[in-house]
Image (cartoon, rainbow, N blue to C red):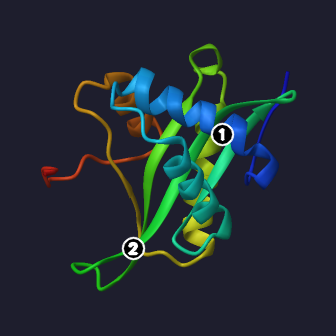
Amino acid sequence: METIVRHPEKKDTEALMGLMYEYIVDFYQCEKPPEKQLENLIDTLLKGEKGIQFVAQSGNNLVGFATLYFTYSTTRASEIAVMNDLYVKEEFRGKGAAEQLFKSCHTYSALHHFTAMTWETAASNLRAQRFYARMGGKKGEFLTYSI
């Protein structure tokens, strides 16, 4: 079955929340955010002002998503897009959905004149690192910290 990538709509909220919980809790083993908080994030992204999402759909089901956030880079003195998330359900990996999501983010970034598209992944996520290398990504020299 063909997978298409598109922008989500309000009617996709429940299915998108399910995917995002899978990504947050199951894949990255982080604490589950409150439902209302995740709904508010999706609503913010639907407006397209601070960021956007793309969803991958196979048949009637959402099977993946990617999120771009808009920010600035001081060293580039310009706006950049940060691909904060790229997730595809396990059974759809290796079938082109991730590549379509990535390319949609990259194309959007270029068409909207962002100086760069950046992203990060867990040091232990070797599969993602191989994928990003295949997509032309280069490892940066900066370390990521959080508090």
Crowding around mark 1 (Cα neighbors within 10 Å: few <14, some 14 to 19, many 20+) is many
Quadrant in which the N terminus is drawn: top right
Q: Is residue 130 left or right of residue 54?
A: left
Q: Residue at x 42, y 27 (%)?
A: 25
Q: Nearer the viewer, residue 143 or 44?
A: 44
Return the residue at label 2. Answer: 71
Name the spot of residue 66 as percent of width and height, x first. Answer: 56, 46
Instruction: Kindly state the secondary structure of the residue where label 1 is placed.
Output: helix
**Furthest residue toward bottom:** 77
Return the residue at label 1. Answer: 16
Q: Nearer the viewer, residue 50 or 108?
A: 50
Mark seen at residue 72:
none
Amino acid of disc 2: Thr
Q: Which quarter of the picture shows residue 28?
A: top left
Count up the numbered dots.
Answer: 2
Q: Is residue 100 left or right of residue 139?
A: right
Q: Is residue 9 visible?
A: no
Mark 2 to mark 1 CA distance (whole Å)? 23 Å
Amino acid of disc 1: Leu
Compared to 49, does 41 lie above or below? above
Q: Is residue 14 left or right of residue 98?
A: right
Q: Is residue 11 left or right of residue 144?
A: right
Compared to 94, does 3 lie above or below? below
Name the spot of residue 141 as percent of width and height, x first. Answer: 14, 53
Q: Residue at x 41, y 33 (%)?
A: 32
**Furthest residue toward top:** 91
